Image: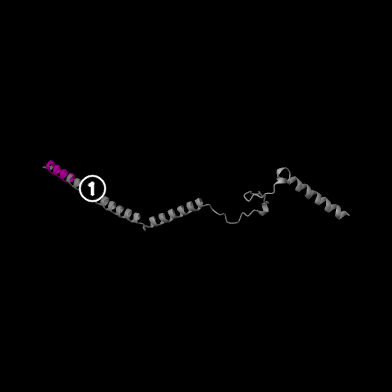
C-alpha cells in the first residue's frame, strides 16, 4: 500500500505539472516551434572550460593578419624583402656620401690649420728679423 501511495503521489505531481504547462491557449494548440530555443542551465561541473574555443571569422582574420605582419617584419629585418633591399642600398649610398663629406671637411680643416701655421711662421720670421 505504501508503494501505491508513493506512486500515486508522484503521478499526482506529474499530472499537476502537466496541467500547469497546458493552461489557456497552449492547451488547445499543440504546435512545436523548431526555432524556439529552450534555455538549459548547466552545472559548474558540466561546463567545458578546457575545450578549444572556436574563434569567429573576424577574430581568425585578425590573428592571420597579425601573423602575416610579424612574418613580414622578420623578413624585412633580415633584409629579404624588396623594400628592405632598397632601404639597405639607399643607406649604403648615404653612408658613402657622409664619409666623403667628413673626409673633405677634415682635409679643409687640415689645410686651414696649415695655412694658419704658415702665417704664424711668417710673422715669427718677420719679427725675428
User: Measured along the vertical axis of the image, is residue 68 above or below residue 123?
Assistant: below
Label 1's element?
A: helix
Q: Nearer the viewer, residue 9 or 103?
A: 9
Q: Residue at x 83, y 50 (%)?
A: 9
Say left or right for 77 vs 118.
Answer: right
Q: Locate the N terminus by quadrant.
A: bottom right
Q: What residue occupies the far left of the structure in this picture?
A: 129
The residue positioned 87% from the left and 54% from the top of the image is 2
Tell me: 13 left or right of 105: right
Instruction: Give the class, few, some or many, for how many residues have Cα within 10 Å of label 1's Cα (few <14, many ≥20).
Output: few
Residue 113's spot in the image, x, y percent?
20, 46
Tell whether 94 sits left or right of 13. left
In the image, residue 77 lies at what x, y percent?
A: 39, 55
- Toward the right, the furthest residue is 1
Query: From the image, which quarter does the C terminus lie in?
Result: top left
At a point 18% along the width and 44% down the height, the residue shown is 116
**Residue stretch rendered in magenta on the structure:** 116-127
Q: Which residue is drawn at 75% across and 45% down?
A: 20
> Was residue 124 drawn as part of the magenta stretch in this picture?
yes
Vertical relation: 6 (above or below) 129: below
Amino acid at each position: 500500500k505504501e508503494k501505491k501511495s508513493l506512486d500515486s503521489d508522484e503521478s499526482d505531481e506529474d499530472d499537476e505539472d502537466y496541467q500547469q504547462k497546458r493552461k489557456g491557449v497552449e492547451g488547445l494548440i499543440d504546435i512545436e516551434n523548431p526555432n524556439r530555443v529552450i534555455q538549459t542551465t548547466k552545472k559548474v561541473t558540466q561546463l567545458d572550460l578546457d575545450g578549444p574555443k572556436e574563434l569567429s571569422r573576424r577574430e581568425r582574420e585578425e590573428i592571420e593578419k597579425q601573423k602575416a605582419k610579424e612574418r613580414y617584419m622578420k623578413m624585412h629585418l633580415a633584409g629579404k624583402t624588396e623594400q628592405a633591399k632598397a632601404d639597405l642600398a639607399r643607406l649604403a649610398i648615404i653612408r658613402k656620401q657622409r664619409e666623403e663629406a667628413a673626409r673633405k671637411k677634415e682635409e679643409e680643416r687640415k689645410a686651414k690649420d696649415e695655412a694658419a701655421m704658415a702665417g704664424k711662421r711668417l710673422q715669427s720670421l718677420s719679427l725675428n728679423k
